[in-house]
Amino acid sequence: MLPLQEGIVYGPVHSRRLGRSLGINVFPRSVKLCTFNCSYCQYGWTRATPKGPRAPADVWPSPASIARAVALALKRGIAQKDHLSRLTLAGNGEPTLHPQFAEVVDHLRTVRDDLAPSVPLAILSNSSTLGTPSVVKALAKLDERYMKLDAGEPALMRRINATTVPFEQIVDGLGKLQDIVIQTMFVRDRLGRIDNTGDVSVATWINVLLRLRPRAVQVYTIDREPAWPYVQPVPAARLDEIARRARAAGLDVEMFASTPMAAAASIR
C-alpha cells in the first residue's frame, strides 16, 4: 500500500484517468479520513472516524494555506515549463469532508484563474456527502467532478466500500449534480465475498447509471496493492465486456485495464 500524503500538494503524478495531475490533499497531516472503507483502497483501511462538517477547523489546513501551497507549486511548474492536465482534489480520503470545503474551492478557483486558467480544477469524490447543500454548491464550481459508484445495489456497495451511508442517499445525491463522470472500480476477491463483475451486478449498475445519465463513465480495476489482500484485479477481457455492455445501453464509457502494481505515489 502507498504511504499517506504528508503535505498539501503532491506530484505532479501520472494518473491513468486524469493525465499529468497535481494532487491536492486537504486533510490534516498524515491522517486518512473517509466515509468509506474500501476493500481496494491503496492507502489501506480508514482508521480515524470522520467528523465531516462538524470537525474542528483548526485541525485541518486552512483554505488560505491550501491556496498558498498550490500557488507555489504552480509558480514552480510555470518556471520549469511543466505541463499539467489537471489540478485534482484527492489525497488521503474524501475531500468534501473538509469543514470549509466551499471556501477551499473558492480559494483554489482564484489561484487557478490567476496562474493556470487553462488547467481544469477537478475532484475525486466517493459521492457520500451529497446530502449537504453547501457541498453540492461547491462541487458545481469545479470544472470536473469524478464521482464514485462501485455497485448498483446496497448490499454489494456495503461489501465493496464498507460504508454506512445509505445507497439511495448516494444515488439521489448524484442525481442532483450536473455534468459528472462516474468512476467504477471492478474487483473480485479470492474468497468470493466481493465481486461486482457478475452479469446481474453489472446489469443493476447499468440501470442506475441510466437513471443518472452521467456525461461519461470510467471503468477500471486495481493498479496498486489493496487494503484487503485477497482483492484481485479483473482481467482485461472481462473489463472490456463490461464496458461494451454499458456502451450498448447508451453510455459513454472509457476502460482502463490494470498495469503492474506500482510503488510510486499516484492519484487514485
Image (cartoon, helix red, strand yellow):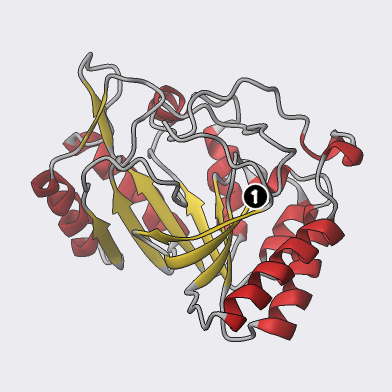
Residue 26 image position (x, y, % from top left)? 71, 49
Which type of secondary structure does the marked residue at label 1 adopt? loop
**Quadrant assignment, res 2:** top left
Q: Residue furthest front?
A: 80
Residue 266 image position (x, y, % from top left)? 44, 50
Tag count: 1
Q: Residue furthest left?
A: 237
- Is residue 229 found left or right of 174 in the rendered image? left
- Is residue 137 found left or right of 19 in the rendered image? right
Instruction: Please rate how many residues cluster around mark 1, counting C-alpha atoms within 10 Å: few if below 14, some from 14 to 19, many from 20.
Output: many
- Is residue 193 found left or right of 53 in the rendered image? left
**Quadrant assignment, res 108:** bottom right
Which quadrant does the N terminus fall into? top left
Residue at 28% x, 63% y: name it: 253
Residue at 67% x, 77% y: name it: 75
**213 lies above or below 42:** below
Residue 110 image position (x, y, % from top left)? 78, 77
Residue at 61% x, 50% y: name it: 173
Q: Which residue type carries mark 1?
A: Asn
- Is residue 103 found left or right of 237 in the rendered image? right
**161 lies above or below 123:** above
**58 or 161, which lies in front?**
58
Residue 82 image position (x, y, % from top left)? 50, 78
Q: Which residue is mark 1?
A: 25
**Quadrant assignment, res 163:** top right
Residue at 37% x, 21% y: name it: 228
